[in-house]
Image (spheres, rainbow, N blue to C red):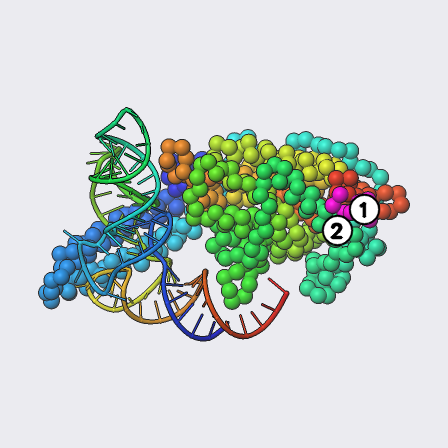
RNA sequence: GGAGAGGUGGCCGAGUGGUUGAAGGCGCUGCUCUCGAAAAGCAGUAUGCGGGCAACCGUAUCGUGGGUUCAAAUCCCACCCUCUCCGCCA
């Protein structure tokens, strides 16, 4: 959510940036509602003052018939005006919350196709390898058929060596995160609607991403980012406590409605996977450098796992509602001879913090919103593909990167 | 899941219809006293929103949402959360 004052002062800018991101927003209507809202608010407050004044005057006195009648009329008028105000405010909030975060001027224009390659690392292998699904099914290590039988399409079982591999990846990731000062965290996998929408996930396009629990205000998390952001909701943290760094481990549940057919074979796009997420709460002036740092950590992880990758700056149209700036790390897929998304790292500035009311007291004693950032450390389903396809040996086995050996009791291949 | 108790300011804790945004205490800040500190005394000390250049004014907030009333922290209803006991259970 943006600051209404900022929108009032920069209406044209907000319009332009929203358009670049591909969002249709009616700023003029919002500003109109803003004016109406404040007019009504003043009216309601004046009426309330009259009510308060009369109540104070009458304290411990017996009110006259006339005063009671006057009070009753006041009450009705207040209630009517309040209802009107509420309606205006609801509409106002709806529009305000649908306005995407602004973006810096150097953001590449256009959609996904304009994502801009920033750097490459590693040697993309060009020889023929088995795609991860074929490889896994032949060995009985990946089972989508039974996943479908038990739960439906896009659910799967992982078996055998892939299970210790997954645990090793997370142990390694946690160790790396701890080295950089991040506190490991496990989180609720079910959260309230407020928590989901506060992180910007209920917005258009995303609502179809979240699984809801019937009959209760609970939703399965699509990423640990959601409960971690909510962790400090409605809190005012001390400036000295910032930055607050978490490495959250959780499953991610995604409906992926309408996403079938697109890159849909195997583990690339599934309804459930485990993920280690890096998360930062920091002062506004530090968010840019933390963004760089998170990206570096993602690169460090890929390098340790010996996965060739490229780093991509995300274009305006592909940023989504919350992001101010975003980088993706894309792994090299030898089976498809192309780079595909593996990790994502966003600076959302104060967009989520404003919505969930996460603030800090700065050195001058002023309270202001923190900035939040999130980055994937390891999403196993996709990392699993990258490992299987990049580390296949001529004998068909998959070599496990040396960095993981200590977490796999010395096992070196699957 | 059942029975009971309870949710008030940074914290503890009073308050069962009317100058209560809220006593008292703790903590914190400033001042006085002191060479300095402690102690003591005095004063100040919530947040959001709207308006104002500002001092400030108004309004809302006593778990949340409704209701009753001229007037609600206080009465009624629903929900949420915490604690104790019982049941169940990894």
Q: Is residue A328 above or below residue A260?
A: above
- In the drawing, what numbered circle is on residue A400? none
Quick check: is A190 in the magenta stretch? no
Extent of the magenta region:
A406-414
Quick check: is A412 in the magenta stretch? yes
Q: Is residue A351 above or below residue A285?
A: below
Q: What secondary structure is marked by label 2?
A: helix
The foreground one among A177 and A384 is A177
Is residue A200 visible in the rendered structure shown here? no
Q: Is residue A347 above or below residue A232?
A: above
Count all numbered tags in the image, as a single digit: 2
Q: Is residue B66 left or right of residue A22?
A: left
Q: Of helix, strand and loop, which mostly describes the magenta segment? A: loop
Percent position of residue A312, x then y: 64, 35
- The residue identified by callout 1 is A411
Instruction: Report in which chain the residue with disc 2 lies.
Output: A
The foreground one among A199 and B18 is B18
- The residue identified by callout 2 is A164
């Amino acid at each position: 959510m943006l600051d209404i004052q900022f929108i009032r002062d920069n209406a044209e800018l907000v319009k332009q940036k929203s358009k670049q991101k591909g969002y249709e927003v009616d700023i003029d209507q919002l500003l109109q509602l803003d004016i109406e809202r404040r007019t009504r608010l003043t009216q309601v407050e004046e009426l309330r003052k009259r009510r308060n004044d009369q109540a104070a005057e009458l304290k411990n006195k017996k009110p006259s018939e006339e005063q009671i009648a006057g009070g009753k009329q006041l009450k009705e008028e207040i209630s009517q005006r309040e209802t009107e105000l509420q309606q205006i405010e609801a509409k106002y909030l709806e529009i305000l919350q649908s306005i995407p975060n602004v973006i810096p001027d150097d953001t590449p224009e256009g959609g996904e196709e304009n994502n801009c390659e920033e750097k490459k690392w590693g040697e993309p292998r060009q020889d023929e390898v088995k795609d991860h699904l074929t490889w896994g099914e032949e060995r009985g290590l990946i089972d989508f058929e039974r996943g479908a039988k038990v739960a439906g399409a896009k659910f799967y079982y992982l078996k055998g060596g892939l299970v210790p591999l997954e645990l090793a990846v997370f142990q390694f990731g946690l160790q790396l995160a701890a080295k950089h000062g991040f506190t490991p965290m496990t989180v609720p996998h079910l959260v309230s609607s407020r928590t989901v929408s506060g992180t910007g996930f209920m917005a258009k396009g995303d609502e179809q991403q979240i699984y809801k629990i019937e009959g209760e205000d609970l939703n399965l998390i699509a990423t640990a980012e959601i409960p971690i952001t909510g962790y400090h909701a409605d809190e005012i943290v001390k400036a000295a406590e910032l930055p607050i760094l978490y490495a959250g481990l959780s499953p991610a549940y995604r409906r992926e409605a309408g996403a079938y057919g697109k890159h849909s074979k195997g583990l690339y796009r599934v309804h459930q996977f485990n993920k280690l997420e890096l998360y930062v709460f920091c002062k506004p002036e530090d968010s840019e450098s933390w963004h760089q740092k998170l990206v570096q950590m993602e690169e460090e992880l890929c390098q340790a796992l010996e996965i060739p990758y490229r780093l991509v700056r995300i274009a305006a149209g592909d940023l989504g509602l919350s992001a101010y700036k975003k980088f993706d790390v894309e792994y090299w897929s030898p089976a498809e001879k192309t780079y595909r998304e593996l990790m994502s790292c966003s600076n959302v500035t104060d967009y989520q913090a404003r919505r969930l009311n996460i603030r800090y007291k700065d050195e001058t004693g002023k309270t202001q919103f923190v900035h939040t950032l999130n980055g994937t450390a390891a999403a196993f389903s996709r990392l699993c593909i990258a490992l299987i396809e990049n580390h296949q040996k001529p004998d068909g086995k998959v070599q496990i990167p040396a960095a993981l050996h200590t977490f796999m009791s010395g096992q070196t291949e699957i």
